[in-house]
């Protein structure tokens, strides 16, 4: 049985047809291959997620190239929206978190914010309807890119000793305490923080998608010729719509938090820790 | 805004998990099941709190310094 059959097998299942509620599980995050090929002995599977990721990238590139292809002194239309996004990242994140030397990192944060936002936003786009970032590999890849940015940056700006010394050996602590504190700081700064960076985005998108799916399926499942069926179906449908609106907010918020954390890590790499 | 909020959250989690885990391992080794695990949890939390208060105190001093510079 292919994956799409698993997902759609609940379609002929209704309240009084004797089957239980087909609750969605992790299988709604698995997709059939659209295409498959091999490069350098590596199997490349193209799924809906891959396509949606490339669509997200194309939409961002298309929009911002269109917005800034003929920039005018007094911005109008698309340029206005693009500049609002730019100023939001520059003043709201880069200058706020990193400070005066934050401007060189605006393009980096800007790209991250809009890519993550659009990947999240795919969760409520009709027919796409799955957030790209709800597949754990995506936030992990994003968080790894941030990770391999701020660690070398810290070594470059503060020197190997300065960066790792400041991070792992907090000054003003009695020497024997380092035996206990250094492993803690090492795990906390170099492993737990990047891990939570990815998990925070993934878990929010995963849970949100599962919630919307559950209530959408409930609206379909309960729809039958009985009072409780009709009332329950209507209620589930309303909740699904409300959750979609709520998800729109969460998607923006998570993209913002992801970018904010990237800026926090870069700021920590630029400025010596106390 | 500084990164102390995020850093301290991960410190609290890490301290607790790391030293509870170490306590669990040691207690498996010596055969005293739960006791050393509890000791580890308390030690881990204490160390996390120590690091957290240290960084918050440092921040307070920095804020005060900045305020004095503004007043001068």
Image: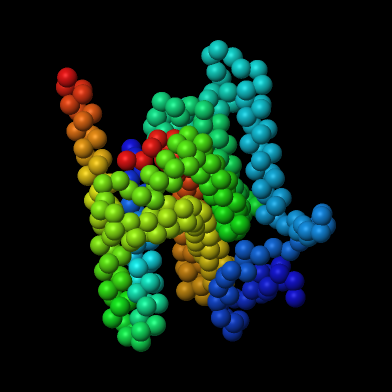
Residue A249: percent from the left, percent from the top? 46, 47
Nearer to us in this view, B48 or A162: A162
Nearer to us in this view, A80 or A156: A156
Left or right side of A45 for A85: left
Left or right side of A160 for B21: left
Residue at 62% x, 29% y: name it: A64
Nearer to us in this view, A154 or A132: A154
Q: How are the residues colored?
A: rainbow
Residue A135: percent from the left, percent from the top? 60, 58
Position of A63 relative to A133 (above/below): above
Position of A90 relative to A27 (above/below): above
Residue B23 appears in view: yes
Residue B12 appears in view: no
Position of A189 relative to A112 (above/below): below
Residue at 56% x, 45% y: name it: A148
Residue A149: percent from the left, percent from the top? 54, 41
Residue at 39% x, 59% y: name it: A183
Pick out the residue farthest to the front: A175
Pick out the residue farthest to the top: A73
Left or right side of A225 for A52: right
Q: Quadrant of the C terminus of chain A?
A: top left
Nearer to us in this view, A102 or A4: A102
Badge count: 0
Residue at 66% x, 48% y: name it: A53
């Amino acid at each position: 049985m292919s994956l799409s059959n698993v997902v759609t097998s609940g379609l002929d299942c209704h309240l009084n047809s004797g089957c239980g509620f087909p609750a969605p599980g992790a299988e709604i995050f698995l997709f059939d291959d659209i295409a498959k090929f091999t490069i350098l002995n590596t199997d490349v599977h193209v799924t809906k997620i891959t396509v949606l990721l490339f669509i997200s990238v194309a939409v961002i590139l298309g929009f911002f190239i269109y917005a800034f292809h003929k920039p005018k002194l007094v911005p109008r239309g698309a340029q206005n929206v693009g500049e609002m996004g730019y100023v939001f990242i520059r003043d709201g994140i880069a200058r706020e978190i990193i400070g005066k030397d934050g401007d060189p990192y605006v393009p980096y944060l800007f790209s991250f914010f809009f890519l993550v936002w659009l990947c999240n936003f795919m969760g409520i786009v009709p027919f796409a309807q799955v957030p790209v970032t709800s597949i754990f590999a995506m936030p992990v890849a994003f968080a790894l890119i941030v990770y391999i940015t701020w660690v070398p940056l810290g070594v470059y700006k503060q020197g190997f000793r300065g960066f790792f010394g400041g991070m792992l050996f907090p000054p003003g602590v009695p020497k024997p305490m380092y035996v206990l504190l250094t492993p803690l700081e090492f795990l906390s700064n170099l492993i737990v923080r990047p891990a939570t960076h990815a998990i925070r985005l993934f878990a929010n998108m995963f849970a949100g998608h599962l919630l919307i799916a559950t209530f959408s399926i409930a609206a379909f499942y309960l729809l039958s010729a009985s009072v409780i069926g009709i009332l329950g179906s209507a209620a589930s449908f309303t909740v699904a719509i409300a959750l979609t609106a709520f998800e729109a907010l969460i998607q923006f918020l998570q993209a913002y938090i992801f970018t904010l954390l990237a800026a926090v890590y870069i700021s920590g790499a630029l400025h010596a820790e106390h | 805004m500084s990164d102390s909020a995020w850093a301290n959250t991960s410190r609290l989690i890490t301290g607790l998990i790391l030293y509870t885990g170490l306590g669990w391992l040691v207690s498996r080794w010596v055969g005293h099941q739960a006791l050393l695990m509890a000791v580890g949890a308390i030690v881990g939390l204490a160390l996390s709190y120590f690091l957290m208060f240290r960084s918050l105190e440092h921040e307070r001093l920095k804020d005060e310094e900045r305020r004095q510079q503004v007043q001068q």
